[in-house]
Amino acid sequence: MGEVLMVARRIPNPKDRVRFLAPVPNRRTTMWTLVFIVFIGGKLESTVKGTYTTMYECFDAREALSYEVGKGNGYFNPGSQAVCVYREDISV
């Protein structure tokens, strides 16, 4: 699904003056959200079309969307566009 990110935490050892670092899993997840933007009657409208774990998955979905509502091959009609937005979801 993706790479495992690691952060370090301190583990004290009363006998040592030096504190050692031990890895713990990072609970932060990266994601890409595909947003479709279009002007309708002079008003800007947008909708989330999907959320993906990699940039490449999002770009593939964007290209597929361009065939559905645009000119295809990643091109959209004037007044519309789709963008992949990078996000971090911090889960606890």
Image (cartoon, rainbow, N blue to C red):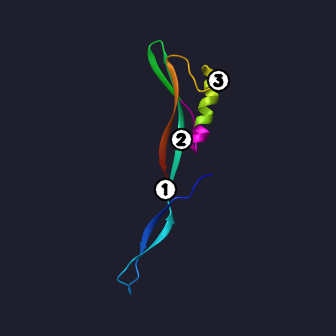
- Element assignment for label 2: strand
Q: Residues within 10 Å of mark 2 (few under 14, many from 20)?
A: many
Q: In screen coordinates, is 18 left or right of 87?
A: left
Which circle marks residue 32 in the picture? Answer: 2
Circle 3 Cα neighbour tier, 10 Å, few/some/many (<14 / 14–19 / ≥20): some
Residue 64 % position (x, y): 64, 29
Q: Which mark is residue 44?
A: none
- Please give the name of the residue rendered at 59% of the width and 27% of the height, measured from the top-left corner: 74
Q: Which residue is mark 1?
A: 92
Q: Quadrant of residue 49?
A: top right
69 inside magenta stretch? no
Q: As displayed, is residue 30 above or below residue 62?
A: below
Query: The residue under label 3 is which amino acid type?
Result: Tyr
Which numbered mark, 2 or 1, is in the foreground of this view? 2
Amino acid of disc 1: Val
Binning the other alpha carbons within 10 Å of mark 1 as few (below 14), some (14 to 19) or many (20 upward) gives: few
Above or below: residue 73 compared with residue 90: above
Residue bearing mark 3: 67
Which portion, as a residue range, is magenta? 48-58
Between 40 and 53, which is closer to the camera in this rendering?
A: 53
- Can you name the residue that lies furthest to the top here? 41
Q: Residue at x 57, y 55 (%)?
A: 3
Q: CA distance from mark 2 to mark 1?
A: 19 Å
Tell me the CA gap for discs 2 and 3. Answer: 20 Å
Q: Position of residue 60 (x, y in %)?
A: 62, 35
